[in-house]
Image (cartoon, rainbow, N blue to C red):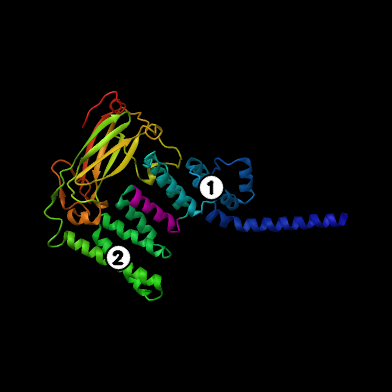
């Protein structure tokens, strides 16, 4: 019996020495390619920390990710975020966690009217930046960053920067390369958009007859190339449809109808549907910084004193009107400041194509005597700002503007 016991201990010792040797050889590779950037396991329970130290980081991350998915499907978004933080510490190379986490922060925190809490967008950008730093050699998160700017923030110039980085990777999903050309066109980079479509079309030509998917990809790129050339010629050619400039006769008013409820309405000289006016109410002098570097370190906390509401209102028969109720979401709209700005913006870059045919994608074909904003050299926009006080919004005072 003692001989068997001695043999067992000897075998365990040999296995331990072999494991130690393998660990010594493998650790430098793991530290270089797989170790998380975070230095402290913030938020881990003793049991979770033990699992991490024992070498089961990815296993633990997978379990937590399944748990986070359950929170998402039940609508418990607040519970999702801390779990995402743990998962990214345990497995910093899980791209889905970074992409989905940024999507939650950018889109899923909303008020009663499904308006996004845009205070979370800088957090989403910082989260994606961390993911890119941990995974610089894949295209996915560069694309997610570009999409956030293109679709949610509606800043096509910044979108182009990140989408070009994603486009450098040869294994990028072919259809997603198209967003770069669309962003370039919206940013007024018309020559770049044409060149991008031309390059994509030439790439599709190489495998055009390979299968149905390849033929479809070629057809899509060919149509977009021709449509882009036609749009540019029609809007900015020798006899442009954008000239003479159309007087937009833009105006907007704000009225407090109940405490924390405002009625916004105005006029925009677009006789057809497809135009939208953006309305932003925020603490006076405080704009959100939509750059990943806006935050020094990532956090899930937003400024609880900041009020920032953004909505998009359709224009019908040259008029727009909406009652905006912020009384049901006091955490999202705390109204702690003494003064507020209500900003009205018409950005032609995100108008419907048939409207852009008349005024241009960059607003080249529109003018306005009072509210034309030419501060951005890439686009002419319409902008009006109205000031309200806290007392007025809380119905301690009332006025129309």
- Which of the 4 image quarters holds residue 298? top left
Judge whether residue 292 is colored magenta: no
Q: Position of residue 123 (x, y in %)?
A: 42, 43
Q: Quadrant of the C terminus?
A: top left
Q: Is residue 180 above or below residue 88?
A: below
- Identify which residue is drawn at 25% across, 67% down: 226
Q: Is residue 399 above or below residue 94?
A: above
Q: Is residue 255 shown to the viewer in this render? A: yes
Question: Which residue carries the number 2 mark?
Answer: 197
Q: Is residue 223 above or below residue 282?
A: below
Q: Position of residue 66 (x, y in %)?
A: 55, 50
Q: Which residues lie in the magenta part?
A: 136-152
Q: Within 10 angstroms of label 2, few (less than 14), some, or many (20 or more) residues?
A: many
- Which of the 4 image quarters holds residue 200? bottom left
- Identify which residue is drawn at 60% across, 40% down: 45
Mark number displayed over residue 329: none
Taking depth in this image into account, of 191 and 181 the one nearest to the observer is 181
Q: Within 10 angstroms of label 1, few (less than 14), some, or many (20 or more) residues?
A: some
Q: Quadrant of the N terminus?
A: bottom right
- Which of the 4 image quarters holds residue 265? top left
- Identify which residue is drawn at 21% across, 64% down: 230
Left or right side of 32 for 194: left
Question: Which residue carries the number 1 mark?
Answer: 70
Left or right side of 173 for 269: left
Q: Is residue 135 above or below residue 291?
A: below
SS of the residue under disc 1: helix
Q: Position of residue 290 (x, y in %)?
A: 35, 44
Q: Position of residue 252 (x, y in %)?
A: 21, 38
How many numbered markers are drawn? Answer: 2
């Amino acid at each position: 019996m003692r001989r068997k016991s001695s043999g067992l201990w000897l075998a365990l010792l040999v296995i331990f020495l072999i494991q130690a040797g393998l660990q010594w050889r493998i650790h430098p590779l793991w530290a270089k390619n797989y170790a998380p950037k975070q230095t402290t396991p913030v938020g881990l329970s003793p049991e979770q920390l033990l699992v991490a130290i024992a070498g089961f980081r990815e296993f633990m991350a997978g379990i937590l990710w399944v748990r986070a998915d359950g929170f998402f499907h039940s609508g418990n978004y607040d519970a999702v975020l801390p779990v995402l933080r743990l998962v990214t510490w345990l497995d910093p190379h899980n791209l889905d966690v970074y992409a989905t986490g940024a999507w939650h922060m950018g889109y899923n925190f909303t008020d009663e009217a499904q308006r996004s809490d845009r205070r979370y967008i800088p957090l989403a950008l910082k989260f994606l930046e961390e993911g890119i730093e941990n995974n610089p050699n894949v295209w996915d998160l560069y694309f997610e960053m570009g999409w956030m700017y293109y679709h949610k923030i509606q800043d096509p110039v910044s979108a182009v920067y990140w989408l070009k980085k994603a486009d450098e990777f040869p294994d990028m999903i072919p259809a997603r390369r198209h967003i770069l050309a669309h962003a370039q066109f919206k940013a007024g980079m018309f020559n770049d958009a044409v060149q991008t479509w031309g390059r994509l079309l030439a790439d599709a030509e190489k495998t055009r007859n390979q299968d149905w998917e390849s033929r479809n990809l070629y057809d899509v790129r060919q149509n977009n190339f021709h449509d882009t050339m036609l749009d540019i010629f029609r809007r900015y050619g020798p006899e442009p449809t954008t000239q003479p400039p159309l007087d937009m006769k833009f105006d907007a008013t704000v009225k407090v109808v109940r405490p924390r409820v405002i009625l916004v309405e105005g006029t925009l000289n677009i006789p057809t549907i497809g135009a939208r006016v953006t309305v932003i109410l925020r603490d006076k002098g405080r704009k959100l910084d939509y750059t990943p570097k806006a935050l020094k370190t990532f956090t899930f906390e937003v400024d609880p004193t900041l009020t920032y509401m953004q909505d998009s209102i359709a224009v019908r028969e040259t008029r727009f009107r909406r009652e905006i109720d912020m009384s049901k979401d006091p955490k999202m709209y705390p109204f702690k400041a003494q003064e507020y700005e209500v900003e009205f913006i018409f950005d032609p870059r995100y108008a419907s194509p048939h409207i852009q045919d008349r005024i241009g994608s960059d607003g080249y074909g529109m003018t306005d005597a009072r509210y034309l904003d030419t501060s951005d050299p890439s686009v002419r926009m319409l902008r009006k700002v109205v000031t309200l006080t806290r007392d007025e919004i809380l119905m301690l005072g009332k006025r129309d503007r």
